[in-house]
Image (tube, coloured by chain):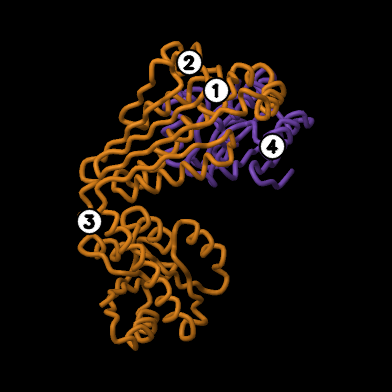
């Protein structure tokens, strides 16, 4: 029986929303008077769905959406919007709200909206449960030098790592930054052999050289090889380019005040900071990035 | 005053401050779309009276080294003319990236656009 938490500081509106939902015999309805109380109830146990008003004391609808998205990402939130609050609704959707229902059309829309969101949410929960049963995942990619593929690959690997329970939302961002830096390095510095120094001294020459080498052998024939191995405790991602490699120990320390104004070296700094281990091969054309599950992260919802 | 509405950098001018609002993260400065918009941003620096730059990151949760390079390149352009650069509305993750790269030691990181505008306008160079 799905539990639905209705959050509204107006007892009249709580009663109205509750009345509409209670017509569904399978739904169990609970109430909170503001976002703060809702968060206290969530800490004790999570409902399948939250319906919230926007304007409330203590913790308002936007703050509640942000907190739920961060702490309970599998619990969807539906907003009840008033006329004139469309901008706030857009903000809430950007923050991660699942849907919204205008207050003026609750009687017509609310039950249908809840049914739709519950169906999607149920699929996500089942998928999360299934992923918690996975013990190992392995995938490989061979990319040409197309920078447009990098964000999609990063997103895919982030998603995999998060589903496997290796990282939470915050760590997902850090893993994404590290992977993006490693892939960009493999493409521009590795396969196309273009130094960031050129960008520093002559931006137009840098762009022209990128264009030229993207279609010029041997640079254009090189590929980026990516393998990812995920387990509930660790993600190991290896990125290899087909360039001549480099000596990472010779990179200037970008945090040294002397080097602060130079363009290069920061990508490797971010990789080393955001991953648990970053290992280059002897040639310097392959980097292995390792992220270990934070204590407790991989223990969630075990199969 | 809104100068240009684009896909990657929204650019506005407020008195002598160029306000750059990145709309998405950047992987490189070699992408065709990015190059065109990057040129536009740089051209705004030549507009008469523009002296300082504020980066407003309210649209981005995080960014990487390419965005840092963009900021660095603009800062290098304005510094000889006694220009200042400030950053505002950064997420926790973006603030961490600025701290790691030590750019928070040379650019004020402000909680709001108003605070960033105040920062670039009020302090002596």
Residues at circles 4 and 1 in contact by the CB criterion of under 8 Å: no
Relative to the observer, which residue lies in front, B21 or A109?
Answer: A109
Residues at circles 1 and 3 in contact by the CB criterion of under 8 Å: no
- Whole-number angstrom distance, CA of label 1 to CA of label 3: 41 Å
- In the image, which disc is placed on residue A301? 3
Relative to the observer, which residue lies in front, A160 or A253?
Answer: A160
- For chain A, give the colour: orange
Label 4 resides on the chain identified as: B
Q: Is residue B122 visible?
A: no
Estimate how packed mark 4 is, as few (under 14), some (14 to 19) or many (20 or more) residues with alpha carbons within 10 Å.
few
- In the image, which disc is placed on residue B32? 4
Residue B120 in percent (x, y) is at 60, 30
Residue B103 in percent (x, y) is at 49, 25
Residues at circles 1 and 2 in contact by the CB criterion of under 8 Å: yes
Q: Which circle, 1 or 3, is nearer the viewer? A: 1
The residue drawn where x is 71% and y is 39% is: B13
- For chain B, give the colour: purple
Q: Is residue A80 left or right of residue A27?
A: right
Tag 2 secondary structure: loop
B76 w.r.t. B49: above or below: above
Estimate how packed mark 1 is, as few (under 14), some (14 to 19) or many (20 or more) residues with alpha carbons within 10 Å.
some
Q: Is residue A121 left or right of residue B110?
A: left
Tell me, yes or no, whether dots 3 and 4 are on the same chain: no
Tell me, yes or no, whether dots 1 and 2 are on the same chain: yes
Name the quadrant containing residue B125. Answer: top right
Residue A209 in percent (x, y) is at 68, 23
Tell me, yes or no, whether dots 4 and 1 are on the same chain: no
């Amino acid at each position: 029986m799905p539990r639905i938490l209705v959050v509204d500081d107006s007892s009249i509106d709580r009663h109205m929303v509750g009345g509409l939902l209670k017509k569904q015999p399978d739904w169990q309805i609970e109430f909170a008077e503001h976002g703060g109380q809702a968060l206290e109830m969530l800490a004790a146990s999570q409902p399948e769905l939250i319906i919230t008003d926007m304007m409330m004391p203590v913790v308002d609808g936007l703050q509640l959406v942000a907190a739920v998205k961060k702490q309970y990402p599998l619990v969807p939130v539906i907003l009840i919007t008033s006329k004139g609050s469309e901008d706030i609704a857009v903000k809430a959707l950007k923050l991660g709200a699942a849907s919204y229902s205008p207050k003026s059309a609750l009687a017509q829309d609310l039950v249908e909206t809840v049914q739709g969101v519950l169906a999607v949410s149920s699929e996500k929960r089942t998928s999360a449960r299934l992923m918690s049963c996975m013990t190992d995942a392995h995938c490989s990619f061979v990319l040409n030098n197309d920078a447009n593929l990098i964000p999609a690959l990063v997103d895919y690997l982030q998603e995999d790592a998060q589903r496997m329970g290796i990282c939470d939302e915050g760590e997902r961002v850090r893993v994404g930054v590290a992977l993006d830096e490693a892939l960009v390095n493999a493409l521009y510095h590795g396969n196309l052999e273009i130094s960031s120094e050129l960008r520093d001294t002559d931006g137009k020459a840098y762009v022209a050289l990128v264009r030229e080498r993207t279609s010029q052998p041997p640079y254009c024939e090189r590929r980026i090889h990516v393998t990812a191995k995920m387990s509930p405790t660790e993600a190991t991602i290896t990125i290899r380019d087909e360039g001549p490699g480099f000596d990472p120990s010779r990179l200037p320390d970008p945090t040294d005040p002397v080097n602060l104004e130079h363009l290069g070296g920061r990508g490797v700094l971010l990789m080393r900071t955001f991953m648990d281990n970053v290992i280059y091969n002897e040639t310097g054309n392959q980097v292995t990035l390792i992220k270990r599950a934070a204590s407790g992260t991989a223990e969630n919802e075990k199969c | 005053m809104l100068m240009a509405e684009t896909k990657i950098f929204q650019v506005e001018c407020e008195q002598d401050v160029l306000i750059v609002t990145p709309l998405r993260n950047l992987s490189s400065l070699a992408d065709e779309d990015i190059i065109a918009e990057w040129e536009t941003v740089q051209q705004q620096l030549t507009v008469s009276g523009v002296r300082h730059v504020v980066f407003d990151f309210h649209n981005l949760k995080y960014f990487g080294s390419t965005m840092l390079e963009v900021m660095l390149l603009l800062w290098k352009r304005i510094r000889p003319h006694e220009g200042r650069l400030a950053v505002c509305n950064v997420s926790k993750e973006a603030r961490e990236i600025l701290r790691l790269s030590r750019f928070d030691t040379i650019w004020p990181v402000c909680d709001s656009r108003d605070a960033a505008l105040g920062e670039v306008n009020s302090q002596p160079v």
